[in-house]
Image (cartoon, grey):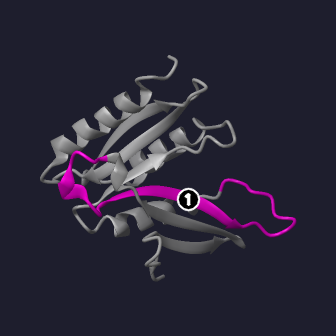
């Protein structure tokens, strides 16, 4: 499967049908998350797994092929050693913490010691907390700066929100 990359959006994406259901893995440029680290310009992407096609009459059920497909796509995308991936659990359905255990399980099951993963939470204006994570290569030359900037982002975002 080839990567799709549009000039306008710079979003990298790849789609794949699984049991006639089509999912898309997206990597959206997100340099705004680490403005204090100019070395990461063009290297920070938000990961999303989107449901593109759900045929009529098909009920979504857990599929054991989704995890290795998503993780394999992440591994391939992360062959550029400068990239940092962020993951923000969707809060639109008010189930923002539901994907966290699945994402953690994927990481624990499929990740090698190649990657560093850091977790955090953000609080929205209504006091609702949602999970965030960042993933980068463990041997990244500015690994410590990324970890500190990730924590700073979460603390700054949460500073004026209800606890």
User: Where in the figure is residue 116, as x and y percent of width and height?
Assistant: 27, 46
Residue where numbered disc 1 is placed: 49
Q: With 55 as the anchor, is 149 left or right in this view? A: left
Residue 40, quarter of the rendered image: bottom left
Residue 2, quarter of the rendered image: bottom left
Q: With 155 as the anchor, is 35 left or right in this view? A: left
Q: With 145 as the anchor, is 31 left or right in this view? A: right
User: Where in the figure is residue 81, as x and y percent of width and height?
Assistant: 22, 63
User: Where in the figure is residue 148, as x and y percent of width and height?
Assistant: 23, 36
The residue drawn where x is 65% and y is 37% is 95
Instruction: For label 1, count other residues whose C-alpha is less than 10 Å away and answer few (under 14), some (14-19) or many (20+).
Output: some
Front one among 94 and 158: 158
In the displayed image of the protein, which residue is found farthest to the bottom? Answer: 2
User: Where in the figure is residue 118, as x and y percent of width and height?
Assistant: 33, 39
Residue 29, quarter of the rendered image: bottom left
The residue drawn where x is 67% and y is 53% is 62
Q: Is residue 37 magenta?
A: yes
Residues drawn in magenta: 34-62
Front one among 16 and 33: 33
In the displayed image of the protein, which residue is found farthest to the right? Answer: 57
The residue drawn where x is 49% and y is 62% is 70
Q: Is residue 154 above or below residue 59?
A: above
The residue drawn where x is 57% and y is 23% is 127
In the displayed image of the protein, which residue is found farthest to the left? Answer: 141
Q: Is residue 139 above or below residue 28?
A: above
Q: Is residue 3 magenta?
A: no
> How many numbered discs?
1
Q: Does dot 1 land on a helix, a strand or a loop?
A: strand
């Amino acid at each position: 499967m080839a990567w799709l990359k549009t000039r306008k959006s710079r979003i990298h994406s790849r789609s794949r049908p699984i049991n006639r259901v089509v999912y898309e893995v997206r990597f959206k440029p997100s340099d705004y998350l680490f403005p204090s680290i100019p070395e990461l310009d063009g290297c920070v992407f938000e990961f999303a797994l989107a449901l593109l096609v759900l045929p009529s009459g098909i009920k979504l059920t857990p599929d054991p092929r989704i995890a290795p497909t998503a993780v394999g796509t992440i591994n391939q995308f992360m062959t550029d050693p400068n990239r940092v991936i962020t993951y923000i659990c969707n809060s639109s359905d008010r189930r923002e913490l539901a994907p966290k255990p699945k994402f953690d399980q994927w990481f624990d099951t499929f990740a090698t010691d190649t990657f560093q993963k850091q977790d955090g939470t953000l609080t929205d204006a209504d006091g609702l907390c949602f999970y965030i994570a960042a993933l980068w290569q463990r041997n990244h030359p500015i690994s410590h700066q990324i970890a500190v900037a990730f924590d700073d982002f979460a603390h700054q975002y949460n500073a004026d929100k209800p606890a």
